[in-house]
Image (cartoon, rainbow, N blue to C red):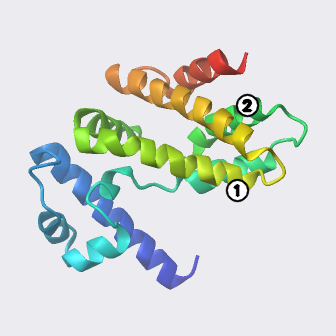
Amino acid sequence: MGLRESKRERTRRTIQERALRLFLERGFDATTVAEVAEAADVSAMTVFRYFPTKEHLVLQDEYDPVIADRVRRRPAGEPLLRRIALSILDGLDDLPPDPQILLARTRLILDTPALRARVWENNHATQRAIAAALPDEDPFAVQVAASACLAAATTAMTRWAEAGGRLDLRAVMAEALEVIVQ
């Protein structure tokens, strides 16, 4: 990563971290983008350059390319559902290193109607990333398999967050995905 990309990534991460902190302290609806910009020491325009909507401050992550890459690297002869499920499970290794940040994001999503409503949109984007990684597969079959796996993953994340992050996320995710892969 070059200097410019490194600086952009650092700015993006700072904006998102400050936004999460404000959302947790004040609530998502009570916090403005202007307040996020001030906390991150950037302009509101800069916030919107990195995050097109306020909801993206919480929901946006770099997980889709990770899943797509893992799907591409799985054995081609592996059953589609298993290929996607194991890619999602293995992708947990690339989530934010601080489980408290992931827990805070997940709780914020669960507790905020505007964010919960956007989860479907995020899952749809993930489905598209998975489909793009599997160009030789039947697109409908990929969509169905990805939807099933993402529903299981969302259910696992919910269970983990409701337990306050005390459960082993990988074990909960593996259990949820195993239900549909059997």
Q: Position of residue 66 (x, y in %)?
A: 62, 52
User: Residue placed at 48% from the left, 24% from the top?
Assistant: 156
Residue type, label 1: Ala
- The residue under label 2 is 81
Q: Judging from the image, what secondary structure is the residue with disc 2 in?
A: helix
User: Is residue 8 at least partly visible in the picture?
Assistant: yes
Question: Horizontal placement of 136 versus 176: left or right?
Answer: right
The circle on residue 132 is 1
Q: Which mark is residue 79?
A: none
- In the picture as drawn, the residue positioned furthest to the right comes out as 77
Q: Which residue appears at 31% of the width and 59% of the height?
A: 16
Q: Earlier in the sequence, mark 1 or mark 2?
A: 2
Toward the viewer: 133 or 17? 133
Can you give x and y, in whole percent of width and height, for residue 70 in the image?
A: 71, 47
Label 1: which secondary element: helix
Left or right, 19 with respect to 91, comes to: left
Q: Residue at x 42, y 76 (%)?
A: 8
Mark count: 2
The C terminus: image quadrant: top right
Q: Can residue 97 be seen at all in this image of the molecule?
A: no
